[in-house]
Image (cartoon, helix red, strand yellow):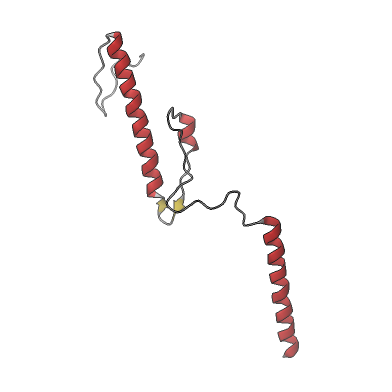
Amino acid sequence: MTLILLYLVVLILIGIVLFGVASLVFGRGEQLPPLPRATTATVLPASGVTGADVEAVKFTQVLRGYKTSEVDWVLDRLGAELDQLRGELSAVRAAAGLDEPVHTHHAAPAADEESV
């Protein structure tokens, strides 16, 4: 019985030493320190969002899908960017004296608008 207990203690000590060595050599497995609470690693540029930026967006996965606050933030940013671009386009069209085409969200574009 004493011999088994001694083997068990030695095995536990070897495990602790191996764990310590592995922790020193490999670290915690993170390239960056953990983010502060209530922040996100999801990034988009302040303006000039491109298709590549949107494709590069990654959301943190949680138990039931993606983290809602990150998805909401990205959608808000993209919405603001679209509103800004549409406002600038309207201003340019107004300055050029062009009539603005009327769009509804679900209507198919007219044949003459497809080439614009």
The quadrant the C terminus occupies is top left
**In the rendered picture of this protein, how many numbered marks are placed on residues?**
0
Q: Residue at x 56, y 51 (%)?
A: 33
What residue occupies the far bottom of the structure in this picture?
1
Q: Where residue 50 sits: x, y (%)?
A: 46, 28
| Above or below 68: residue 4 | below
Q: Residue at x 30, y 9 (%)?
A: 96
| Above or below 56: residue 103 | above
In the visual, does 28 lie left or right of 87? right
| Above or below 35: residue 1 | below
The quadrant the N terminus occupies is bottom right
Q: Nearer the viewer, residue 40 or 58?
A: 40
Q: Residue at x 76, y 87 (%)?
A: 3
Q: Where residue 32 sits: x, y (%)?
A: 58, 49
What residue occupies the far right of the structure in this picture?
3
Q: Where residue 69 sits: x, y (%)?
A: 38, 48
Residue 100, quarter of the rendered image = top left
Q: Where residue 34 sits: x, y (%)?
A: 53, 53
What residue occupies the far front of the structure in this picture?
36
Q: Nearer the viewer, residue 76 or 4?
A: 76
What residue occupies the far top of the structure in this picture?
97
